[in-house]
Image (cartoon, rainbow, N blue to C red):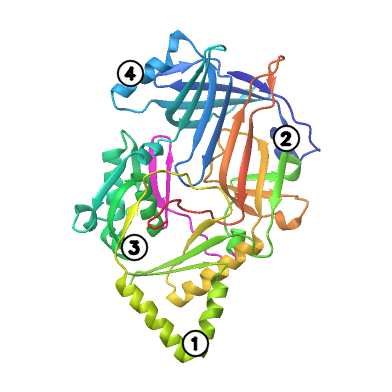
Amino acid sequence: MSVIVKEFKRKPQPPEVDVISAVRSIDCVLKVGDTEIPQVQMWRTNEVTYSAGTTMEVTCPASLDYDLMKKSQEIVKQGKPLPVVLTTVMSINGQPGKGGEEFNGILDVIKLNLKTRMYTLNCVSYARVLVNEKISETVAGTSNAGKTTAQVVEDMVKKYGKGLKSKVHPFKTKVGQVYKDKMVKTIKNMAVWDLLESFANQDNADLYVKGDTLYYVPKPTDVAPDVTELKGVKPDLTFTHAQLLDGDVTHSALYAHDITVTVKSYQPKTGQTYESKANLSTAQINAVAKKLEQNPSTYAKVNALSVSKMKRKKGQDSVSSTYKPARIGKKENYVFNLPNVTQEDCDRIALKIAEDISQKEFAINITVPAYPQYNTRQYVALKDMPSAALNQVYAIKSIEKSMGVPDQDGSAQGYIANLSIVNHTVQSAGVTFGS
């Protein structure tokens, strides 16, 4: 599909951003398996920073020249997923530009409207293969218990990935220690993806699938005192207020954001890891604890009861029979990894970060002209906003891009991107042990 995108009417802009308002011609190429599909009518992608929830919906004419339902049946018999790749190449004012992949995944559902003779293809990330594969095992004494998380991630991708490749950082965390810390004795009907997310939560790893490759790598860590400003992070994209097609900002100044913050610190000399969690109820818990400490007899009684309960506690079974993509919403867990700090530092910093995010977060949705190169591992800077407080650097939580059917004159207004951004690092994983 080749369409011309109408120029959006905006206020005068600096010369360096004139290209945003230029007339853009977009060529789309859709391949299902080894077959190129002509005349794509509409597509919409939704890429999320975490979880296996990246999807695409695309509409195209049905034809016996590329019988997709027949092709799907042939692939099913081979036990393989049917790959789907959408690429776009943009020309600006007649000058060809650099293209890129809008989506690289697998076919999930095919719908065919018999009257219009149109296909609607629902496609998902290759990560969904690992979501569909379930495992059950008694973790104690298994061969995996003595391996590192990195080794098990590679093994799982090779065994269950159906051709999925992997790039894994050599994390040294022992899987047996993870099970021990989480008191997991058995895994029942658990999705392979959920198991990998549990390991990623322990390693503070960035787990995602791009195209046909799974990445399990260290997350870029922002250790600035004011974590909600992403200080020291260089933006990949910059938008002024004049460039926005639409946008809205949510700010909750009175601790209205329901979050949990986890702070971890690894001590290389001792091999020990400290961890602390804090949320907006932490202050209330601290107040209760202080009252108990002021009354020794009450404190001793409560403490003895707590110890007794812990002694009776048994190892848990981890189960995840169904998959729910991590929600891009307000109730989330943010993980920060700080080098060489004590347990007391972790406790203090976790509470401070939770308060900072709650009081100072800006959750923003912006609509801008789309480009093939946009991805969720980029950072966005906003400038010349109606409030100076918004002129910061932001991390991307999700990107939804779409392109519609051309108008009768051959032009279209549909190649746009909706970015969900926040002024701090984003959640690292969706499902973990015990959640």
Q: Is residue 190 left or right of residue 329?
A: left
Query: Counting other residues with Cα less than 10 Å from the Cα at mark 4, is it few (<14), some (14-19), or many (20 or more)?
Result: few
Q: Is residue 78 left or right of residue 60?
A: left
Quadrant position of the C terminus in the picture: bottom left
Q: Marks 2 and 1, Cα distance to the nearest angstrom?
A: 64 Å
Q: Marks 4 and 3, Cα distance to the nearest angstrom?
A: 43 Å
Labels 4, 1: front one: 1
Labels 2, 4: front one: 4
The amino acid type found where label 1 is placed reads Glu
Q: Which residue is mark 1?
A: 293
Ranked by sequence position, the earlier of labels 2 and 1 is 2
Query: Counting other residues with Cα less than 10 Å from the Cα at mark 1, is it few (<14), some (14-19), or many (20 or more)?
Result: few
Say the numbered circle drawn on residue 182: 3
The amino acid type found where label 3 is placed reads Lys
- Figure check: 230 above or below 237: below
Q: Which residue is mark 4?
A: 74
Which stretch is magenta? 204-226
